[in-house]
Amino acid sequence: MSQSGEQSKYSVSKRGFYGNFGGAYIPEMLYPNVKELEDNYLRIIYSESFQKEYKDLLKNYVGRPSPLYHAKRLSEKYGTKIYLKREDLNHTGAHKINNTIGQILLAKELGKKRIIAETGAGQHGVATATVCALMNLECVVYMGAIDILRQEPNVKRMLMLGAKVVAAESGSKTLKDATNEAIRDWINNPVDTHYIIGSVVGPHPYPDLVARLQSIISEEMMEQMQEKEGRNYPDAIIACVGGGSNAAGAFYHYLDNLKVELIAVEAAGKGVNTGETAATTTVGTPGIIHASKTILMQTEDGQIVEPYSISAGLDYPGIGPIHAHLFESGRGTFASVTDDEAVAAGFELTRLEGIIPALESAHAIAYLKKRTFKKDQVVVINLSGRGDKDLATYIKYFDNNESLR
Amino acid sequence: MNRLDSLFQKKKNNILSIFTTAGYPKLNDTLPVVKALQEAGVDFIEIGIPFSDPLADGPVIQDSSTVAIENGMTLKLLLSQMEDIRKELTLPILLMGYINPVLQYGIENFAKKCSEVGVDGIIIPDLPMQEYLEDYKKVFDQYNLKNIFLVTPQTSDERIRFIDEHSNGFIYLVSSSSTTGKKTGIDGAEEYLSRIQKMNLKTPTVVGFNISSKESFQKATQYANGAIIGSAFVKAINNNKDIAAGVKSFVGAIR
Ligand SMILES: Cc1ncc(COP(=O)(O)O)c(C=O)c1O
């Protein structure tokens, strides 16, 4: 992560906008918290002491750099050269920890005593509970009541790590509602609490903060590409997008390199026209969700629509403002993948490469079926997490579907 | 003259405002509820625009919003109900809601319609000061619509001065750093409220959040021109068969 004056047209503006999207539409109750963060985050995260501790923990605790693995059998199958950026090998099993390590150090520097977080798949909740255990800070994780049921192993991990898991019972009882509850907690605890948001969403400066902390993914990718391919960029990067933090991190250092196609894959759920989907850019329109102007799924009256995806981490009715900008400006390629396509891709990767991907990451892999890349092209898929947490869902599909066995 | 301005000119103390959610408990209850409030002698009324994701609200107002949306309430419908409401009501009326439904309606359309149907002011907690000044103020001013800002115990004196300078109507003093209806009563807010009282702001002040009883109303109005009751009222009309009688007894118990 380097501060370098990289002010591209895809970076955040002083007022917290990416093109038409972003900002901080917060109630006055949150003003001091958000202002404190805004005034201090760049100074802190680029300080020498922060960088030293952050890099040390990433290396020795998380296990970075994560490998860039040439997936030969997958490449063969799709007739192109495919690398997997192995975020699944990180401690706790996903890219989420890159962000929580950074934010816990930031929270400590700001003198905060209590940490709150929202979680969908539970990966961000686990990554937050983990760094709270490491730093001995109180931790409360909000999680939709439905997600608590479908991601049970992660709930147990959070509890074992000493976090308190609070069920969000409002609305659709998934990630959106968990985020509402975390924001309400922050309103009620404005002084000693830091909110570790888990994606590039929420009020400015969160989208920028989280993108910078995740940018380690593309920072390493540049070096690894150089080593393996003799040039520091691939032709395309594919990443799944819930809120969009793994994608933002994988794209970050390539935003201005127009030779690299940036492909964002959303969850289509049961299909973009079924009403049971989370494919935000396909069915959404501009509006404000969780204090950020972005593209979201909503009714004509401006009520936020409940999304659906088999993958709890992608089950969110918005996208980070940086992605809304990449979509609107045409810099990003946006696609969507259904539950069935994602699960099939998960099985395929498992059998071809011996890697069980998280259902979220399986969406990125499934994109290979939607596109033909050339034989000499180099494609990086950001494998954002491992599938241990999703075993129950995979096995249910496996048992119900002859063709997978 | 704007009805809010005349109210604050005529009356300096013990101003009572009640918040009610539009379309709650039943879709067509908005009019009977506010009519009963006027008859019961409240000074002004806030009508909540229901929203699916009300970040600044606690469970009572969240639930009333969910019910109202299920009942079929929309901003469009509320603004058309306002036409009938205005025929029967002389009190100042404010709409309180979140920014997204207003954005989808269209800011200019919204302001224009509000002025046509006799809405006097707007409270949008998630519309920040800076955005308001840059993108909304001109339109709101053009339609003589007051935008009410919030101040909390965490707001610095400097920022309070800034808000005072740009406010008209009144300043909404949030009684504690909390979502709505978090607790009953405003014990502990005395120091904060008296600090603001001593600042001698040019804009009238009204305290809201967690005011639920005669006692908390009286306490709040020692420090400010008035006070607003929300969650406690919404809870009270929840399963009241006779709206007029229910409203009358609720307001009667406050003052
Ligand atoms: C493995 C994995 N990938 C992706 C996501 C989606 O988040 P984001 O879009 O912020 O990367 C999650 C969220 O829980 C996740 O656990």
Image (cartoon, coloured by chain):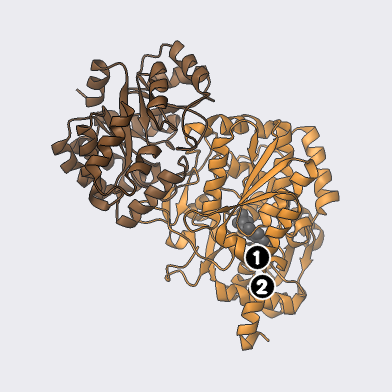
Chain colours: A orange, B brown
| Left or right: B252 in relation to A3 | left
In the picture, which quadrant includes the C terminus of chain B? top left
Q: Which residue bears the numbered disc 2?
A: A392
Query: Which residue type does callout 2 highlight?
Result: Ala
Report if the CB atoms under discs 2 and 1 are less than 8 Å apart. no
Per the image, label 2 sits on a secondary structure element best described as helix
State the image coordinates of residue A213 (x, y, percent, origin top left).
69, 45
Q: Residues within 10 Å of mark 2 (few under 14, many from 20)?
A: some
Vertically, is A167 above or below A207? below
The CB of the residue at mark 2 lies under 8 Å from ligand 1: no
Quarter of the image where one finds residue A238: bottom right
Q: Pick whichever, A368 or A297, lies toward us.
A: A297
Vertically, is A359 above or below B58? below
The CB of the residue at mark 1 lies under 8 Å from ligand 1: yes
At a point 23% along the width and 29% down the height, the residue shown is B41
Residue reaching furthest to the left: B87
Visible residue check, residue A322 = no
Q: Quadrant of ligand 1?
A: bottom right
State the image coordinates of residue A209 (x, y, percent, origin top left).
64, 41
Q: Which residue bears the numbered disc 1?
A: A361
The reply to whether label 2 and label 1 mark residues of one chain is yes
At a point 56% along the width and 47% down the height, the residue shown is A201
Residue reaching furthest to the bottom: A402
> Which subunit holds the residue at mark 2?
A
Query: Which residue type does callout 1 highlight?
Result: Ser
Residue depth check, mark 2 versus mark 1: number of the one nearer the observer: 2
Query: Reading the chain from its start, which is encountered first: label 2 or label 1?
Result: 1
At a point 22% along the width and 25% down the height, the residue shown is B2
Vertically, is A168 above or below A149? above
State the image coordinates of residue A88 (x, y, percent, origin top left).
74, 62
At a point 49% along the width and 27% down the height, the residue shown is B152
